[in-house]
Amino acid sequence: MAHDERLEELAALQALGLPLGGESGAFARHREEGCPTCEELLVDFQISASALAAAVPARRPRPELKQRILGSLPGARPAVVAMPRRPSGAAWWLAAAAALLFAFAAWDDARLRRQREDLRSQTAQLSAELSTARQEMARRDLRVRVLESDDVKVLFLGGKDPQPSARAKVFWSEKAKTGMLLAGNLAPLPPDKQYELWVFAEGKPVAAGVFDADASGRALFESTSLPGVAAAQNFAVTVEPRGGVSQPTGPIVLVGTPAAG
Amino acid sequence: MCSATGGPAMNADSREADRALVARVERRDAEALAVLYDRHAGRLMGLAQRILGDTGEAEEILQEVFLHVWKAAATFDPSRGPVLAWLLVATRSRSIDRVRSRRPGKRGGTVGLEEAPETASREDVEADAAGREWETHCRAAISELPEDQRRALELAYFEGLTHQEIAERTATPLGTVKTRVRLGLMKLRERIRPYRKSEAHGA
């Protein structure tokens, strides 16, 4: 994907920690493609945004805040306060002990409540992080299996009528017998239709899986593993009934131009 | 504070010291957390108060942030930036969440940067000369931005407003807002880049 102002706007939003809305998937995929301009821009924008924080004058919190924080740390002992030894009667000790007990109970209750709230928000945060990490892992796994295999070949697919502006790249690994398709400018399809990828082997099309394009017409799709394909000669994408078919029936929207020989 | 993402407000020693403190916090060393607090609470408080416009709430955010550090020190990843970056992101995101949760009621942090009062309680927590110089540089860079770009950036950064929300707040077309935010960051980047390059390499 070429670098443009829209990507710069998305990089700006990302750097400011703001939601990217419907374009978040597209931007993530663009970064997956590896755009050094965007990566550099993101870092620079983050630093630029933090200039806004740097310009804010520091402010001294009230001194008791520090003690409040240190006193609320779960798993840490509260600060031990040395009691001055003074001669006094049993009543004084009883009153002091009761007061201490009361203060401790109140402190402990508040501490537990805060702990509970913290745990709840931490759990939500962790499960969100886990889900993001899983998605990231799946993407990396895809990369490792296809993009980084030593026999990967890349074929460009051009758009055909009725979608002449569609375009795609296929990364195919002969060893893994699988590939990855990265497409753009795909037209939206009716709900009962899907795009289907075909691998041409020995002059015949073999179904390699169905996929949908996102709202911005992009698609990142890992093909079905096709152990029966000895050597992929070409690739094409057609529009087919949702779920796919075993032989192409719909119009070809993308087709590759294999190298001669 | 721009050192949050690799900028030069703190030197390498200072960053190293922060990382060592977080490692100690991970081992349940409350004293290390206290030192971390002494080093950065002023900056975090300034940021939280700027966003929330309320001292009490800003202190609550600080409490949450340091409690988070205590519990999640193990999740700190030095490869993603210095400790101060981690603290600032935690402070900003919690403050913005709180501002968002109280909408559409009163809003905090609507005071412009140069209008923000420099109170007598101002504290230079990182009182090193490099840090102060960097802050001065950042202020100068921001003051040189065209008013509309600066305003759009402040609304995004301090109030967490999206493009659409900024457009509504300032009665400006959405496309114009997108351009202002982008150009504002581009200009800050141009102003800050030479300064970063002239700095010694940090952590």
Image: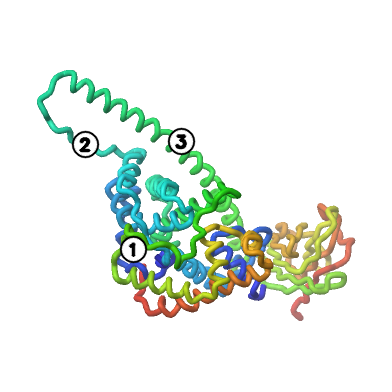
Residue position marked by numbered label 2 in the rendering: A81
Q: How crowded is mark 2: few (under 14 residues within 10 Å), some or many (20 or more)?
A: few
> Is residue A31 found left or right of A249 in the rendered image?
left
Are dots 1 and 3 on a single chain?
no
The answer to whether residue B72 is visible is no
The three-letter amino acid code for the residue at tag 2 is Val
Q: On the rendered image, what quadrant is the C terminus of chain B found in?
A: bottom left
The three-letter amino acid code for the residue at tag 1 is Arg
Task: Name the disc covering residue A137, or none.
Answer: none
Residue position marked by numbered label 3 in the rendering: A116
Residue in front for this viewpoint, B55 or B35: B55
| Residue A208 figure quarter | bottom right
Secondary structure state at the residue bearing disc 1: helix
* Residue drawn at the location 56% of the way across and 50% of the way down: B100
Residue in front for this viewpoint, A54 or B81: A54
| Residue A17 figure quarter | bottom right
* Residue drawn at the location 30% of the way across and 60% of the way down: B17
> Is residue B124 found left or right of A211 in the rendered image?
left
Q: Distance between the residues labelled 2 and 3?
A: 27 Å
Q: Please name which of the two marks, 2 or 1, marks the residue nearer to the observer.
A: 2
**Labels 2 and 1 touching (C-beta < 8 A):** no
The answer to whether residue A126 is visible is yes
